[in-house]
Image: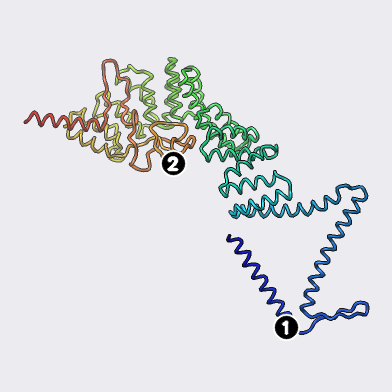
Amino acid sequence: MLWSLIKIIAFVLAVTALTYGATQLMEVDGGATIAIAGIEITLSTLELVFAFGALVVAVWLSLKVLAFLVATFKFLNGDETAISRYFDRNRERKGYEALGEGMMALASGEGHLAMTKAARADKLLKQPQLTNLLTAQAAEMTGDRAKAEETYKKLLADDKTRFVGVRGIMKQKLSDGDTDTALALAKKAFALKPKHEETQDVLLRLQAEKADWAGARQTLGAKLKSGSLPRDVHKRRDAVLALSEAKGIADEGKSIEARETAIEANRLSPDLIPAAIMAAQGYISEGNARYATRVLTKAWAAQPHPDLAAAFAEIVPDETPQDRLKRFTKLTKSTADHPETKMLMAELYISAEDFPAAKRALGDLVKDQPTARILTLMAAIERGEGAEDSVVRGWLTRALTAPRGPQWICDNCQHIHSGWAATCSNCGSFDTLSWKAPPSDDVAMPSGTEMLPLIVGSPKGTEIAVVDPVADAESVDDAEVVEDKDEK
């Protein structure tokens, strides 16, 4: 509607301008005299302008007639397509003009105009490999999904445009949430163009979502070969995929294959914590304590983590607290100043009931980094030293509102996960989980070893209690209630 109004206004302005110009020319004095074969023709200024315009049109028509006569002459001399080529050139020129105007309209966001120009170009050019893509994209812009899909399907018939058609339908299925169909189309597009980076990324993401780890590793290898992925990044992500594959194999009950795949993942990326743990557990099941120790020590040196300490404790589950303290020295000696090492040593001393040493092991962490886990450790130390319940309850109360410390957090969307995963459950990003402190205190309570591991696996006949701030705070309150009742 707006475009029609603009054209009407432009027409009115053009007529007005021509009328005004003709009026001005009529008022101009003088003219021109043309003498041809003794005949003189006198023209006014306005007549001279019209005569010049007529001359230009006559020259143009003469050239067209001359070109047609040449085509006719060629036809009479045996060139059967000469006349048809003459008219085809005009049609082709107009078709390419319409195609160019359609592309400009598409770039300008005028979807309906682009579809109109695409239809005209298709009628003139008879080259659907050029016009169908413009039609499909214009249909998507105007929200005509059915027309877009129909046009993309037409592109599948030509080898030159098949990839474009598959990719277009794939993107539609992705936007519709039909990931199963999108995955099948992504595989087909990848087979047509293995080096197409966007197709590689889409296929890799969908394979990871569907837990097709073996296929994802093949796609990742193709990205490396095509040069779209640095070798060090490929090595890290291949380790993540290998670890995920190992977990899937383990769920199927194939323990030996899972162990071998986990060891491969650890070899590819020694600092990948879950891979190190799974590889170490595989070595432990084989009775190879030396290799398990080596794997966990190397991973701990790169990134201390409570799960690594728990796995290290599994190597010798029945040792005494004193023997465990001595053995853990090999794990912690390279990271003595790391907060995780200090908390680990405090837990070990608590297990050995050496509470003053546990307090010394924490050092300034209580003041500098008062996380829930550190404050809970202090509560355990105070209880071990025989402090009053009010003191223990004070530490536990502080722990309830304290920052929770490092957790598995997605670098892309900052979503907090209870455990490591290859893909973020919130945004679907691949290999974006890092062990770090959350950006704010409003986070989920960690579970298991993240809260207070205390390195389970105590010697036979000895139980080590894991302190939980919520439960202990309630137990202290319950104890006071009982004491009040007894006094009464």
**Mark 2, residue position:** 413
> Can you give x and y, in whole percent of width and height, for residue 274 in the image?
44, 28
Query: Crowding at label 1, few (<14), some or many (≥20) Cα neighbours within 10 Å?
Result: few
Q: Earlier in the sequence, mark 1 or mark 2?
A: 1
| Residue 121 as seen in the image, left or right of residue 383 | right
Q: Quadrant of the C terminus?
A: top left
Query: Crowding at label 2, few (<14), some or many (≥20) Cα neighbours within 10 Å?
Result: some
**Quarter occupied by residue 156:** top right
Residue lying furthest left:
488
Q: Which amino acid, mark 1?
A: Glu
> Can you give x and y, in whole percent of width and height, for residue 125 in the image?
74, 49
Q: Which amino acid, mark 2?
A: Cys
**Mark 1, residue position:** 27
Can the viewer see residue 10 in this picture? yes
Q: Quadrant of the N terminus?
A: bottom right
- Along the viewing direction, whichever of 366 and 396 lies nearer the viewer: 396
| Residue 57 as seen in the image, left or right of residue 229 | right
Can the viewer see residue 262 in this picture? no
Residue at left 90%, top 51%? Answer: 74
Cα separation, mark 1 vs mark 2, equals: 75 Å
- Along the viewing direction, whichever of 255 and 342 lies nearer the viewer: 255
Residue lying furthest bottom:
29
> Can you give x and y, in whole percent of width and height, for residue 306 in the image?
36, 29
Residue at left 38%, top 23%? Answer: 312
Q: Which mark is residue 70?
A: none
As helix, strand or loop, the secondary structure at mark 2 comes to loop
